[in-house]
Amino acid sequence: MILYNFLKMTVHRNFKTKVITPEDAGKILTPSFRNNHVIVFTNGCFDLLHRGHIHYLSRAREMGDLLLVGLNTDASVSRLKGPGRPVAGEHSRAEVLASLMFVDYVLFFDEDTPLDLIRILRPDILVKGGDYKPEEIAGYREVLSWGGQVEVIPLLEGYSTSSLIRRIGG
């Protein structure tokens, strides 16, 4: 029972510490860390996490040693997706993402694109879903300029948050 409680507390603490600020990221992504690890970045609204997201995020993590996920704030999602979105609040969405074993850290951004966050984090690999062409991805030119790469992961057919919301009558 003591070991179970210790593990439960450790998992909860680790889960909570995976939601970080750009300043926290700067302390983690030191030059020596960067020299020994491939840093992958992706972003999204991740409203109503579904199988397509799981597929996409796990594939992104396979591309490197550390997966950073930029998460649109509620205000950003509302501007991009319209009234009634997000369905789940930003802290809820962040905790769900942080609970995934292949997501190392989650960072909020309030802008419509994560370009400023990408410039701060300077990932080795920038990843987006198959609904984007590489040159349309925010941060494409910047990541290539410092020698990084941009990857597009094909979407799982039939999985999107918008289609799920339409199906349930939202």
Image (cartoon, rainbow, N blue to C red):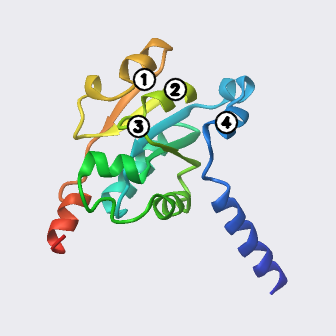
Disc 1 is placed on an element classified as strand
Q: Which residue is mark 3?
A: 111
Q: Which residue is mark 4?
A: 23
Q: Which residue is mark 1?
A: 149
Graded by Cα atoms within 10 Å as few (under 14), some (14 to 19) or many (20 or more), the crowding at tag 4 reads few
Identity of the residue furthest to the bottom in this view: 1
Disc 4 is placed on an element classified as helix
Q: Are marks 1 and 2 in contact (CB under 8 Å)?
A: yes
Foreground: disc 1 or disc 3: 3
Question: Mark 1 to mark 3: distance in Å?
Answer: 23 Å
Amino acid of disc 3: Glu
Tell me what residue is drawn at x 21 percent, y 66 percent.
164
Q: Is residue 79 above or below residue 48?
A: above
In this rendering, position of residue 33 left or right of residue 96: right
Q: Are marks 1 and 3 in contact (CB under 8 Å)?
A: no
Residue closer to the observer: 19 or 87: 87
Tell me what residue is drawn at x 69 percent, y 60 percent.
14
Q: Which residue is mark 2?
A: 124
Amino acid of disc 1: Gln
Disc 3 is placed on an element classified as loop
Residue closer to the observer: 78 or 2: 78
Q: Is residue 130 above or below residue 126?
A: below
In this rendering, position of residue 28 left or right of residue 50: right
Looking at the picture, how far across and down is residue 144, in whole percent?
42, 16
